Structure formats: C-alpha cells, structure tokens
Image: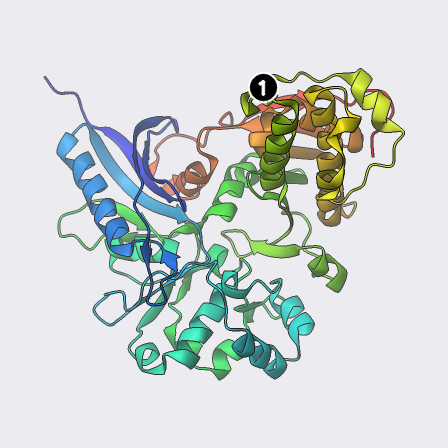
C-alpha cells in the first residue's frame, strides 16, 4: 500500500550552466533532484544567449515528472536564478526577444550619452550603487531596447528579471522583487529608496511590474492546483538568506566561486566613490534592506594560476587539491612584501620556487592578501564577530587559515550546506508551507584558528 505523499517545497535553481529542480522535505533534506543543461542559442546579432524556450519547457517537464510520481505533495514553488537579464513579455505573456546575455557588448555611444544626461558616470553609479558594467547593469538593457528597437519596446507589457519570469510561468502574475532590482541594475536610487529618475523620465516605469516582498506567495493559475508560488529571488541574495535567518549578531559572508563576494548585511552606509572604484556595490535582501558587498575575481584567478604552476612543474592540477598547509613555507615568505593586487602573482617567475607546493603557498598568500583588502572594504568596524566563508575556498585549508590570521578579532568559519542558493529560496517562504519549526542546524561550521602573529 502506498504511503501518504511527503509534503515538499519545489525550488528551481537556474544557473548559467546547470538548471536544477530540488524538492526539500520539511526538515530541509533534498528528497528529489533533477538537473538539465541546454545548448545556448544566439540572438539577432549572433551573440550567444540562453535558450528561453528550452528553459520554459524544462520547468513544466520537471513539474509534470514530480506530479506523475505521486510520492510528493508540492506545497509551494519558488525560483532563484542569475538576475542580470530581462525577459520582455507581451500582453499574452509571450517573450518578444531572446534572453540577451548580460555579457553582450553595450553600444558605447548610447552609454556615454545616457551618463551625460544623468550627471556623469560617477554620480550616476553612486546614486544607483551600480559600478558601470555595461549590459550587466540590466536596467540599461531595457534602455537599449527603448532606444534601438522602439516599436518592439511599445509591445512590451512587462520587463521581468529572469527569476520573476520563471515565477510568472506558474503563477500567471507579473511581479518585481527587490533582490533582483537591487543588484547592480542601475534602476534603483538607494538614497531615495525608489526607482531612479531616469526610469520615470523614459516611461520604463510603466513596464516594471509591481514590487512584492520576497517572502510573499501567490496562487498558481492551474485550476485545482493547491500549491503556492513565490515571486523568485536573485541567486546571490538567496544564498545569503540561510545566514540571515540563522545568525543575528553582525557577520560577513564571503561567498566564494568564480567571483568571491563579501557581503556585510550589517553595513548600510552609502557607497563612497572610492569603494565604487574598488568594485564595491550594494545588493538588497529580500526585505529590501541594502547589503554592502565587494567583489574579487579570485576563483577565476585561482584556476588560471593553478594551471600555470602545474604546467611549469609538470604536475596535474588534481595535485593541488591535496596540498596540506606548511607553516615553514608561510614563514619563509612572510617577511616579503606580498602585494594585495590579485594579479600580482601572475608576473612572478616560477623558477624562484623549489617545487609546486612552495609556488602554490606563495600564490595563496597573494590571493588572501587581495581577499583581505576586498573584505576590509565592507567591514568598516561594524562589530563583526564572525566571518563565514562558503563555496570552494571554504574547503581550502591554506586560504581559511591565512584568513583567520588576518582577522584575529573575528571568528572565521568554513561554512557548508547543501545547495545554499536553493535553500535560501525555500527558507524564505518557510511559514507558508512548512508545519515544522525553522531548523537551526542546516549550516555546518568549521572553525579556523589563527596561529602566532597575525598575517596581514
């Protein structure tokens, strides 16, 4: 005899490469997972972009598979994805353009005339907490559509960030959410806590769906469906949610991957020009609170330098995963003036080093020095007692120990949890679908202790 179906929340986690569906039970264990990858397509200029139709079909196929199984009862559905891309839909909900890639080159003259109209690049970037990043400033993607394809722009009913478009597919309702609006989009004036003046001047405001709170849920459009639908979240902000819900004393989270982003949810000071020039920006929490953040391209640099060292010493890159921390190497080079510029190590002659282990240690000393500089930009003595590191570097003992050395007044933890981004999107709607208490043990912490004199 079949048992009672397990109550679950379904989370679609859409990355650039992998598109995943997770089902979490009430204890936040993953009880089902499905992964898909699609071939990219191209837009009208021949630039590569996401295959929107494949993505749409995948959402429905995945859900139908779960419904057919009958062993799970979906109580709610939420979405998280990269946010710097818009889907433009017409009055019938049909996409009018490809999902343009956020790395697509932005027309230089259009950008220059835009900045000139709004007080220059520096002033505008400060007001919107958005470093000038071309198409990565997703608001400027709509501006490009308005200026270069005005007839098509007129047919746009709603411009939806990707997480909200995914939600729209199921709920049939168009919404905007603060985590997507607040992430280097150039749409929001952080000082005035409202859309920037240019959004009103251009009429783009008419294409922006109503803003809702990230923890709100809506009914699905399908007749007879009992589940609720979340409005979707930007992935970086979603990964922060488990920490915001579990820890209430001031902390910084260093989320490591290709980019290492230091988030300080307890620093709401306005961005300064210097911080902006150092690649700082502001994100938004799901409640619409600014989060100061700094970015460092450290994961990418790590990959490049490991390849360079491996090539020079004729070893496989797999060897670097097993390198244990050797204090004698750290002490040998500690007196040297280690640069805090991330790219500095790339110009060092590798023949100075005895072997790949020594070269790797010195590279990590450079990388962590750059990380210290980036993280310090958002610390600002805000009484931060804990620094959490998640992602790839949280398992790198050399990185973690050197970081603990650098911040002797804070406790430094390597944090791990299964699928932090998807988990954030599930936890934020906990009260709407879960009958159990919010768990306080989902984040596994490993404490790293500083040794001897601080390294900085």
Query: Residue 438 appears in which quarter of the rendering?
Result: top left
Foreground: 94 or 232?
Answer: 94
Rendering coords of residue 364 (x, y %) = 71, 30
Foreground: 269 or 108?
Answer: 108
State the scheme by which the image is colored. rainbow
Rendering coords of residue 91 (x, y %) = 24, 72
Residue beneath the point at 35% across and 60% down: 99
Residue beneath the point at 39% across and 77% down: 206
Q: Which residue is mark 1?
A: 319
Q: Image check: 180 left or right of 130?
A: left
Rendering coords of residue 271 (x, y %) = 70, 60
Number of numbered discs overlaid on the protein picture: 1
Q: Secondary structure at mark 1?
A: helix
Determine crowd level at label 1: few under 14, some 14-19, many 20+ residues with C-alpha closer than 10 A. few
Rendering coords of residue 26 (x, y %) = 35, 29
Query: Residue 317 appears in which quarter of the rendering?
Result: top right
On the rendered image, what quadrant is the N terminus found in?
top left
Q: Is residue 387 above or below residue 158?
A: above
Furthest toward the right, the residue is 335
Furthest toward the left, the residue is 1
Query: Residue 302 appears in which quarter of the rendering?
Result: top right
Q: Image check: 183 left or right of 364?
A: left
Residue beneath the point at 46% across and 75% down: 143
Q: Is residue 87 visible?
A: yes
On the rendered image, what quadrant is the C terminus found in?
top right
Q: Image check: 143 left or right of 248?
A: left
Residue beneath the point at 83% across and 30% down: 455
Q: Is residue 384 visible?
A: no
Q: Image check: 443 left or right of 7?
A: right
């Amino acid at each position: 005899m079949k048992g009672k179906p397990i109550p679950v929340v379904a989370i679609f986690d859409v990355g650039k490469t992998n598109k995943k569906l997770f089902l979490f039970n009430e204890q936040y264990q993953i009880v089902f997972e499905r992964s898909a990858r699609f071939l990219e397509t191209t837009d009208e200029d021949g630039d590569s972009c996401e295959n929107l139709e494949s993505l749409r079909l995948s959402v429905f196929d995945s859900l139908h598979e779960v419904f057919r199984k009958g062993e799970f009862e979906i109580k709610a559905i939420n979405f998280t994805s990269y946010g710097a891309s818009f889907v433009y839909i017409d009055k019938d909900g049909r996409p009018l353009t490809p999902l343009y890639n956020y790395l697509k080159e932005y027309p230089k003259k259009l950008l220059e005339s835009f900045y000139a109209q709004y007080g220059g690049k520096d002033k505008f970037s400060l007001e919107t907490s958005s470093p000038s990043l071309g198409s990565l400033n997703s608001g400027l993607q709509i501006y490009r559509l308005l200026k270069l394809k005005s007839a098509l722009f007129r047919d746009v009913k709603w411009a939806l960030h990707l997480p909200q478009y995914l939600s729209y597919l199921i709920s049939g309702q168009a919404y905007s959410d603060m985590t997507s609006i607040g992430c280097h989009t150039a749409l929001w004036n952080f000082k005035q806590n409202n859309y920037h003046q240019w959004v009103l001047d251009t009429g783009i405001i008419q294409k922006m769906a109503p803003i809702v709170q990230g923890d709100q849920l809506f009914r699905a459009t399908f007749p007879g469906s009992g589940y609720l639908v979340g409005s979707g979240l930007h992935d970086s902000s979603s990964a922060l949610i488990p920490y915001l819900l579990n820890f209430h004393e001031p902390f910084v989270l260093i989320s490591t991957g290709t980019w290492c982003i230091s988030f300080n949810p307890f620093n709401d000071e306005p961005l300064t020009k210097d911080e902006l020039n150092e690649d700082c920006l502001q994100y938004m929490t799901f409640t619409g609170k600014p989060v100061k953040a700094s970015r460092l391209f450290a994961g990418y640099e790590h990959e490049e330098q490991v390849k360079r060292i491996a090539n020079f010493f004729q070893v496989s890159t797999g060897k670097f995963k097993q390198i244990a921390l050797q204090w004698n190497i750290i002490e040998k080079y500690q007196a040297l003036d280690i640069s805090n510029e991330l790219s500095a190590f790339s110009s060092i002659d590798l023949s100075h080093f005895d072997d790949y282990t020594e070269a790797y240690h010195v590279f990590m000393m450079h990388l962590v020095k750059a990380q210290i500089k980036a993280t310090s930009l958002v610390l600002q003595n805000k009484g931060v007692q804990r620094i959490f590191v998640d992602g790839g570097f949280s398992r790198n003992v050399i990185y973690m120990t050197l970081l603990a050395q650098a911040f002797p007044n804070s406790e430094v933890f390597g944090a791990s949890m299964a699928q932090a981004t998807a988990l954030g999107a599930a936890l934020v709607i906990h009260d709407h679908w879960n009958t159990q208490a919010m768990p306080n043990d989902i984040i596994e912490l490993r404490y790293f202790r500083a040794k001897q004199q601080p390294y900085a």
